[in-house]
Image: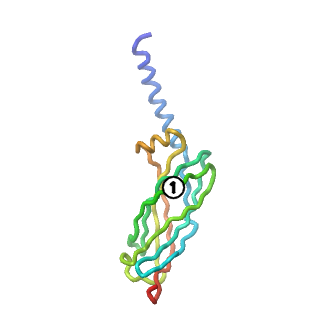
């Protein structure tokens, strides 16, 4: 055997291995996200707290680690809230899970609005694809998969008496 034989084999199999690794990562389906409800939890003169209830679904045969939500809220087209929140959850295989995201609407950003107003919350959820390769690619920053969500609702802000 010539010394170049192992190198030739490596040159052939390395791209094949890389292609197969890429196919394996893309085979993971992103978690599904649905906003199933929004409600005003608390109102004070300085802010309104709105709670978004999300339903997350995993159509994969393996659990999917959820990492971080990055999301923002707009009231009547004006950005009033930006947040990052650790997901702190793993979606079980072929399962669903409910998570709650808080949205704070500061009066300092909206003024003394009262009545119904358009609230649009949008963001992304980063997650780790199943398997050792998915974890390694995530940890090294090579592949950080994300899924987006958006929800538009009407929200009651304040009241005539300022509460």
Figure quadrant of residue 108 = bottom left
Quarter of the N terminus within the rendering: top left
- The image shows a total of numbered marks equal to 1
Q: Specify whether 95 is left or right of 5.
A: right
- State the residue at coordinates (51%, 34%): 20
Q: Position of residue 78 (x, y in %)?
A: 38, 72
Colouring chosen for the image of the structure: rainbow
- State the residue at coordinates (44%, 48%): 144
12 vs 74: above or below: above
Of residues 47 and 31, the one nearer the viewer is 47
Q: Position of residue 105 (x, y in %)?
A: 43, 74
Q: Hey, which residue is sitting farthest bottom in the picture?
A: 161
- As helix, strand or loop, the secondary structure at mark 1 comes to strand
Q: Position of residue 67 (x, y in %)?
A: 48, 53
- State the residue at coordinates (46%, 83%): 158
Residue denoted by label 1: 88
Figure quadrant of residue 138 = top left
95 vs 22: above or below: below
| Label 1 packing within 10 angstroms: few (<14), some (14-19), many (20+) | few
Of residues 107 and 153, the one nearer the viewer is 107
């Amino acid at each position: 055997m010539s010394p170049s034989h192992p190198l030739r084999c490596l040159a052939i199999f390395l791209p094949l291995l890389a292609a197969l690794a890429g196919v394996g990562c893309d085979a993971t389906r992103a978690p599904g996200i649905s906003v199933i409800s929004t409600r005003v939890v608390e109102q004070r003169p300085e802010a309104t707290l709105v709670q978004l209830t999300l339903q997350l679904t995993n159509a994969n045969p393996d659990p999917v680690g959820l990492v971080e939500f990055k999301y923002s809220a707009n009231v009547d087209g004006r950005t009033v809230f930006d947040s990052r929140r650790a997901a702190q959850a793993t979606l079980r295989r072929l399962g669903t899970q409910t998570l709650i995201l808080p949205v704070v609407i500061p009066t300092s950003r909206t003024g003394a609005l009262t009545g119904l107003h358009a609230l649009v919350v949008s963001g992304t959820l980063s997650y780790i694809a199943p398997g050792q390769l998915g974890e390694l690619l995530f940890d090294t920053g090579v592949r950080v998969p994300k899924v987006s969500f958006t929800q538009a609702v009407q929200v009651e802000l304040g009241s005539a008496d300022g509460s």
